Image (cartoon, rainbow, N blue to C red):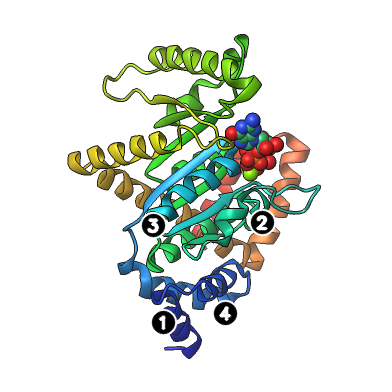
Amino acid sequence: MNTDVDKLVTQIRQGSRIGLSRSITLLESTRADHRKKSEELLSILLPETGKAIRIAISGPPGVGKSSFIEALGMLLVGQTKKVAVLAIDPSSPITGGSILGDKARMEELSKSDLSFIRPSPSSGVLGGVARHTRETLLLCEAAGFDVILIETVGIGQSEVMAASMTDIFVQLHQPFSGDELQGIKKGVMELADLIVVTKADGDSFTAAEVAKNELERAVMLTRTCEGNIPKVLLTSAHKNTGISEVWTAITSLVEARNDSGSLAQKRREQSRQWLDQEIATELLSLLNSQPRFAEALEATQQRIEASGEHCGRAARALIKSLLAL
Ligand SMILES: Nc1nc2c(ncn2[C@@H]2O[C@H](COP(=O)(O)OP(=O)(O)OP(=O)(O)O)[C@@H](O)[C@H]2O)c(=O)[nH]1
Ligand SMILES: [Mg+2]
């Protein structure tokens, strides 16, 4: 075995944050030799993963995700739990990087010896970002972290990605005064295990209460299956109120799902999904590495442009002809 990998394994087992950072950099690298090493590292450590509570914290930009994570994280490190904060963020073409998981909003937490904060990988397509985050999560578990919080912006695909690798999905909402509820997508509400209204303090306290009531009514309407209705809780990260109630709700959900076996079932399904995604990614890169594929792709593209051939059909014909080779 390669000594580099050996060293990283030892460092991670010791809970070293430097070792963890180095390993994450390795798995984010696009170099083939780095990829091979990171796969070796993950294979060795995989049996030591799975022990943390994995939580997605989602919501629109500016709703207060990082501030909430800081407050929740401080509560947990206060109980001597080790907390890792990761992020899934479709990288912005304008800023060229991630806006989430901002350490500035988690100033206190980032100073704690029991925390580890890693912003979202700043490059690549969402699928790649998701792979890195999932692998980083596993490394954090091997390093002994008890709780993994994944911050994600509330826009479609990245939320679904975050849900596909966590046990509990917490949806954050701004205080509001009434009509805004119509704008909340039903599909997103269906992902939530727990709904948290932020900024329940000062001038926005009343609006937060209105939001709580409206959201409670909305979840009753969208959910039909009894026992599966998410709680709606009021919090203020600034005043540090409602945070421990959120933690209690999370641990009760985890306990109930552990008892019923549904959490283990969920993780099995997630792992199956992950395999499917890896197969799709591998197939595509295998195809792209074939010179014949590039030629055939170009020819197909020209045919589509010239004759308006249906893309799905053209893709199937292309794959069939390559498999027959
Ligand atoms: N009044 C009040 N303001 C808050 C609270 N939590 C966050 N804010 C404010 O809301 C703004 C956004 O907070 P963040 O924690 O950065 O929100 P975010 O959702 O992580 O933002 P992005 O990562 O940019 O999507 C900041 O100006 C915070 O000061 C709170 O509990 N009360
Ligand atoms: Mg943030």
Residue occupying image coordinates x 55% and y 75%: 18
- Tag 1: Cα neighbours inside 10 Å, few (<14), some, or many (≥20)? few
Between tags 2 and 3, which lies in front?
3
Residue occupying image coordinates x 44% and y 75%: 12
Look at the numbered discs 2 and 3 and tell me whether their residues touch, using CB distance below 8 Å.
Answer: no
Q: Which residue is identified by label 3?
A: 81
Amino acid type of the residue that numbered disc 3 sits on in the rendered structure: Lys
Q: Which residue is identified by label 2?
A: 124
As drawn, 156 above or below 133: above
Residue occupying image coordinates x 59% and y 16%: 207
In the shown orientation, is residue 99 left or right of residue 120?
right
Q: Earlier in the sequence, mark 3 or mark 4?
A: 4
Between tags 2 and 1, which lies in front?
1
Look at the numbered discs 1 and 4 and tell me whether their residues touch, using CB distance below 8 Å.
Answer: no
Instruction: Kindly state the secondary structure of the residue where label 4 is placed.
Output: helix
Amino acid type of the residue that numbered disc 1 sits on in the rendered structure: Thr
Q: Which residue is identified by label 1?
A: 10
Q: Earlier in the sequence, mark 3 or mark 1?
A: 1
Q: Is mark 2 within 8 Å of ligand 1?
A: no
Query: CA gap, disc 2 to disc 4?
Result: 18 Å
Q: Earlier in the sequence, mark 2 or mark 4?
A: 4
Look at the numbered discs 2 and 4 and tell me whether their residues touch, using CB distance below 8 Å.
Answer: no
Q: Which residue is identified by label 4?
A: 33
Between tags 1 and 4, which lies in front?
1
